[in-house]
Image (spheres, rainbow, N blue to C red):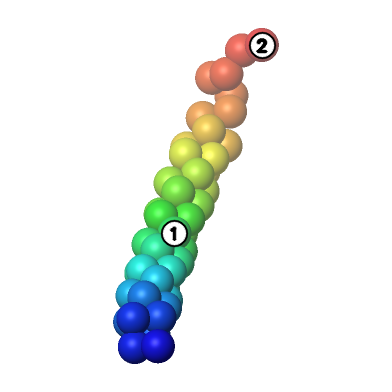
Amino acid sequence: MEKVYKLLKSAGAANIVLGILLIIVGITFGVINIVCGGKLLKNRRNILF
């Protein structure tokens, strides 16, 4: 039984770390998209279709 508990403990810790990393990456990409969108809106007169 101890092996099962140790396995579940390590799996749970790995899932928590992965979740935190995914949240950080998501926030980072969101901020980058907002900044790039703001630059596009600022220079929308120079964009030709």
Q: In this view, does 10 lie above or below 43?
A: below
Indicate the quadrant where residue 16 lies.
bottom left
Looking at this view, name the residue that lies furthest to the front.
1
Three-letter amino acid code of the residue under disc 2 = Phe
Mark 2, residue position: 49
Which residue is depicted at the point 53% across and 33% down? 40
Tag 2 near tag 1, CB within 8 Å: no
Image coordinates for residue 45, horizontal then vertical, percent:
59, 24
Q: Which of 4 and 26 is in front in this view?
A: 4
Residue 22 spot, x, y in % from top left? 44, 59
Question: Is 8 placed left or right of 48 in the picture?
Answer: left
Q: Name the residue under label 1.
A: 22
Looking at this view, is 28 or 7 the one in front? 7
For residue 20, say whether it is visible: no
Which x, y percent locates residue 17?
A: 36, 69
**Nearest the eye: 22 or 48:** 22
Placement of the N terminus among the 4 image quadrants: bottom left
Which of label 2 and label 1 is nearer to you? Answer: 1
Query: Which image quadrant is residue 11 in?
Result: bottom left
Residues under labels 2 and 1: Cα distance? 36 Å
- Residue furthest to the right in view is 49
Q: Is residue 46 in view from this perspective?
A: yes
Q: Say whether residue 33 is left or right of residue 2.
A: right
Tell me the amino acid under the disc marked 1. Leu
